[in-house]
Image (cartoon, grey):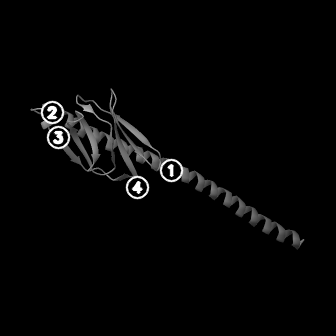
Amino acid sequence: MSETRALSTTLGYTLTLAITAVLVSGLLISGGSFVEDQRERVIKSELDVVGEQLTSHLNAADRLNQSAEGSLTDRTISITQPFPADVAGTPYRVTLVEQPDPYIRLETSDAEIATRVYLTNTTAMAQSRASGGSVVIEYDASQDAVVIDDA
């Protein structure tokens, strides 16, 4: 009879450990995906904010170009604006996409998250790129367009 008791105690202890291990690993797996989802939301939100700020500066360069006097070749418009070098610890890049309805595309290389912000402009926007961090917005007289570049 004493053999049965020893076996049931050991079996109960082993089953308790196994069930606890399964529950803890389930919590860790679900918690890890929750944290990753939150990180992606933060990155997307920060890219949206940077995109809106950059768009406002592009619109300012457009307004300056429209109000400038003199020939196109004499115009010098340059706005240097500091932005964060990364979002949530992830570097990003900005692309000014030239098309009938131009937009800026902000994308990360790490999480492959991207966002678009459309522009309302009068001056043409030329295809150009910049990395995260300080960005220069300039009027390029040779292209008769506004471009972006790294500062």
What is the secondary structure assignment of the residue under circle 4?
loop
Residue located 27% across and 51% down the image: 134
Which residue is label 2 attached to? 72
Say which amino acid is labelled 4: Gly
Q: Position of residue 72 (x, y in %)?
A: 15, 33
- Considering depth in this image, is 151 or 38 the residue closer to the camera? 151
Which of labels 1 and 4 is toward the front?
Answer: 4
Number of marks drawn? 4
Q: What label does residue 77 carry, if any?
A: 3
Tell me if mark 4 has few (under 14), some (14-19) or many (20+) residues whose alpha carbon lies within 10 angstroms of its own.
few
Which of labels 3 and 2 is toward the front?
Answer: 2
Asked if the residue under mark 4 is in contact with the one under mark 2, i.e. CB atoms within 8 Å, the reply is: no
Tell me if mark 2 has few (under 14), some (14-19) or many (20+) residues whose alpha carbon lies within 10 angstroms of its own.
some
Say which amino acid is labelled 3: Ile
Q: CA distance from mark 1 to mark 3?
A: 41 Å
- Please tell me which of labels 2 and 4 falls first in the chain: 2
Give left or right: position of 139 versus 150.
Answer: left
What is the secondary structure assignment of the residue under circle 1?
helix
- Considering depth in this image, is 67 or 30 the residue closer to the camera? 67
What is the secondary structure assignment of the residue under circle 3?
loop
Q: What label does residue 36 carry, if any?
A: 1
Say which amino acid is labelled 1: Glu
- Please tell me which of labels 4 and 3 falls first in the chain: 3
Say which amino acid is labelled 2: Leu
Which of labels 2 and 4 is toward the front?
Answer: 2
Which of labels 4 and 3 is toward the front?
Answer: 3
